Amino acid sequence: MLQFIQRFFGKPPSSATAKERLRLVLLSDHLSLAPDVVEALKHDLIEVISRYVDVDVPNCDVTFEQREKEVAMLANIPILGMHPRPVPPPPPAPPPPPSRGPDLPLLDPTKTGASVAVAERPPAVEPPPAPKPAKPKASGPANGHRPTRRKRRKGMSTNTAAPATS
Amino acid sequence: MHEMHEMIQEEAPAASAVPRKRGRAIVVTSGKGGVGKTTTTANVGAALGASGASVVLVDADVGLRNLDIVLGLEARVRHHVLDVLEGKVTLDDALVTDKRVPTLRLLAAAQTREKDDVDTIAFRDLISSLRDRFDYVLIDCPAGIEKGFVNAIVGADEAIVVCTPEVSAVRDADRVVGLLGDNRTIKLIINRLRPALVRKGKMLSVDDVNGILRLPLLGVIAEAPDVIVSTNRGEPVALDDASPVGAAYRQIAQRISGTLTGPPEIPRERTFFEKLFGSAK
Ligand SMILES: Nc1ncnc2c1ncn2[C@@H]1O[C@H](COP(=O)(O)OP(=O)(O)OP(=O)(O)O)[C@@H](O)[C@H]1O
Ligand SMILES: [Mg+2]
């Protein structure tokens, strides 16, 4: 919407800029103030990904980043290896993953913690020793007595690196 | 809690209108500083008092006392809220009666003390005992969300959030709404609106602000010289029959007491004639 205004009228009115900044800053505030929501999201995310690949759970990290024009979710999910064969997902069944040979990595090795080499390890192996210390979580409120937000929140889309809403 | 409560009752025989009622305790808060909490407390309190209700205004901004100044009562303050909490004087010794509105009282904050000096439980009990004596207990909250804020809200079951149409004020208001929790009735006053700037797209509108905060709107107060002039004089603008801002405060008071319903008026730009013949105060 802002871009639309911008294209036709040059600089948007400052109130529109204020509104947009407010939207982003509040989205970011609410995420950092709802550590329980973020924890639940992280848990579910890992659960889904674990249906397809072996995830290094202790080293998973989900953070949110406020950018110029969006709030993005950044998920760093190191992958230890493939499952021996595609695991049928539990019901209600989402479409099963495309079955590929073990020599075809599902994910770009340059972009994930996983690599073809790691994938070759026997699946039952423990994660590598001395895992990185978990990154500090987005700090909650100092006084910690903010309950989860009220019903009035707009839905937030949490696509990695995608605008939160528009 | 009950013991403290009884103690304060014993020390302070009822002085105001009707003893033993259960008044409403309303905290006026904002998070951000300087958005108009004290101005709002004074004017809404004066308007409620002028309508006949018994009202006590409690300045919870310990260390930065202002409410006495806005009400023009600074010369009458002898004791403050900490004197009462520490048992140095009775509640009646500390309550100052307003010059113009006989049903309006002020309990001043301590100017030379710190917010951390106030015991939260004792403060809550003080508010509770005030509710037994007044129809309305309005609490002027300090800026911030630290101990002063916690003390100011602890005894209140209703809150008025004051917000100006600015990004930082709305953000802080949103934060404060979260901290007030789900067990308090929260209503909104938007202060310092400039209709001409809103029209030009240079200021967030009432809908912009409340599209985010989504609170029941008690009223909208324009940015107005009347407010500054009345504060200079120590005479709440709410008592000025000729002032549009004063009328807006009186309507807020009516909305609080329930005698006025329906959506509040949004301040509009003054017409050319109004500008021409506007009173020079
Ligand atoms: N509607 C208004 N129009 C013009 N001036 C205003 C208006 N509301 C408040 N002001 C002015 O803004 C200043 C700050 O107001 P006030 O002291 O009520 O804010 P506050 O929220 O209590 O501040 P603090 O956080 O420091 O306690 C004062 O000088 C006051 O006169
Ligand atoms: Mg103040």
Image: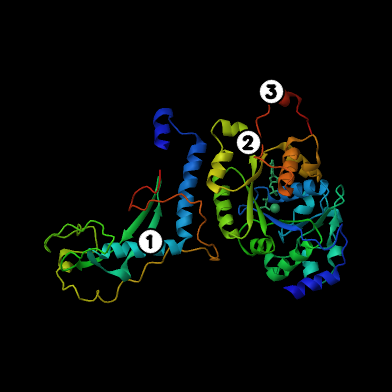
Label 2: chain letter: B
Residue A150 in the image: state x and y as whole percent: 52, 56
Q: Is residue B26 left or right of residue A78?
A: right
Tags 2 and 1 in contact by the CB under 8 Å rule? no
Q: Which disc, if any, is residue A41?
A: 1
Image quadrant containing the N terminus of chain A: top left
Q: Residues within 10 Å of mark 1 (few under 14, many from 20)?
A: some
Q: Give the residue drawn at x 54%, y 62%.
A: A146
Q: Give the residue drawn at x 50%, y 54%.
A: A151
Q: Which amino acid is tagged 2?
A: Arg
**Does the beta carbon at disc 2 come under 8 Å from ligand 1?**
no
Mark 3 / mark 2, whichever is N-terminal: 2
Q: Judging from the image, what secondary structure is the residue with disc 2 in?
A: loop
Instruction: Quickly name the residue at label 3.
Output: B272
Q: Is residue B86 visible?
A: no
Q: Nearer the viewer, residue B229 or A89?
A: A89
Label 1: chain letter: A
Instruction: Quickly name the residue at label 2.
Output: B194
Q: Give the residue drawn at x 74%, y 35%.
A: B244
Q: Which amino acid is tagged 1?
A: Leu
Q: Which amino acid is tagged 3?
A: Phe
